[in-house]
Image: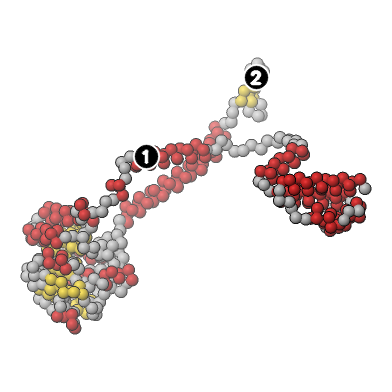
Amino acid sequence: MSHSTPGGLAVKNTGVFTDTGPGNAARAYQWWRNAKFWILCAAVFVVLALVSFFAAGSNNRSSGTLSITNPAPSGAQAAAEILRSQGVTVSATDSLAETTAALYAHGPGTSTVLFHDPQKLLSPEQVAALVESVRDNGGRLVAVTPGPLTVKALGAGFSSAGSAAETSVVAAGCNNPAAFAGQKIDGGAPTAGELAPVSSALQLYTGEQTCFAPTGNDAQKGGYLALDSTGQIAVLGHPGVVLNQNLAELDNAALTFGLLGNTQKLFWYTASLQDVPVSEQPPSLAEFTPAWIFPATLWLLLVAVVGMVWKGRRHGPLVNEPFPVIVQSAETLTGRARLYQDARATETAARALQRATLTRLAHKLRLGQFASSAAVVEAVGSATGRDRRLVAALLEGAAPQTDKDLVTMAVDLAALEEEVARQ
């Protein structure tokens, strides 16, 4: 036979008490209190990871100038979206190998390549290979602000004519269909602060067809647009006409779509470090790092996490248990004195002795607990007949600097208290 007590103990007839323990709800609550910190940390980590993942997957935007995924004023997303709405398939490429492979993968005469190399990464030989691929496939190539060496590699009829000054309006001045569609373009540089690099990229070129020559002295140098005799290769020296913020100005959009919208496919090729030969690329940090450093680092991180979990776990809430403790005053005094000694706090110990002596003397002389030190010194001098200056020096003077002097002062203070007590 057994019966339960209000405390949760089952009492058996054998006289042995066994603990039935808390219920399931109590155990669940206890487990939650112990583990809630780590659960909340894990939940926050998972939420942040998911937010970062979906944000990266949904945005997929670039901040580069002339990027078709950049909706900012310096991007070219507006031109790409309008071309897509007209049935042109617009694809971004970032390497010469990818671009040439895409050209050969489609039928002849169906592709246009917009080539932009702002960092001048491609060699003349690579540019010549791109031109050859475009000509072999009957496609078209539009090079945006190429450098002098790149221009020569585009064809013998092209050359660089220097930079151009800003003008408000530039007329076509040629019979090319694309230029004729955009009869007048905005010749001024972009004004947005973030487009400062583009404003310095207004370049003039000469070709078998030269269009959009600015007025003034620059008219003798060249134009913003140069083409070969067939119009298959074009060089654009004013990238601002393609940008989002300038596309709606004058006939900028007509020129952009006339150059880029005549084929089914448009490859928006921006040169990157993938085009740099491996032998010319600077070694990366991974090449200098030993192969074992990454698994060792992961192992150390795992050990650190396990150690933090092990050391940081809680064993449950603290239990307040009344437990009277009686400590003798001599033990407290000795312990405090040892603390002062270990800390070499001679001055602090001396001040504590002086204050305690003043308090006890004021009590013995019935001066009250709020009596000033001067009153205590006067009363001690009257009671003992000692020189009041010597008493004040002992009770209020400078603290000793050595342990030996501290012991001497303690003896003198004890003797003074005994003398006052005998009166």
Quarter of the image where the N terminus is located: top right
Considering every residue shown, the one lying at the far right of the view is 423
Judge whether 220 appears above or below 380 on screen: below
Q: Position of residue 289 (x, y in %)?
A: 32, 45
Left or right, 197 with reference to 234: right
Name which quarter of the figure residue 370 lies in.
bottom right
**Foreground: 123 or 20?**
123
Q: Position of residue 36 (x, y in %)?
A: 51, 41
Which amino acid, by three-letter code, is at mark 1?
A: Ala
Considering every residue shown, the one lying at the far top of the view is 14
Q: Earlier in the sequence, mark 1 or mark 2?
A: 2
Mark 2, residues whose alpha carbon is within 10 Å: few (<14), some, or many (≥20)?
A: few
**Residue topped by disc 1:** 296
Report if residue 353 is visible in the image.
yes
Tag 1's secondary structure? helix
Q: Residue at x 21, y 54 (%)?
A: 280
Asked if marks 1 and 2 touch (Cβ < 8 Å), the reply is no
Q: Residue at x 67, y 47 (%)?
A: 344
**Residue topped by disc 2:** 16
Mark 1, residues whose alpha carbon is within 10 Å: few (<14), some, or many (≥20)?
A: few
User: Distance between the Cα atoms at labels 1 and 2?
Assistant: 55 Å
Tag 2's secondary structure? loop
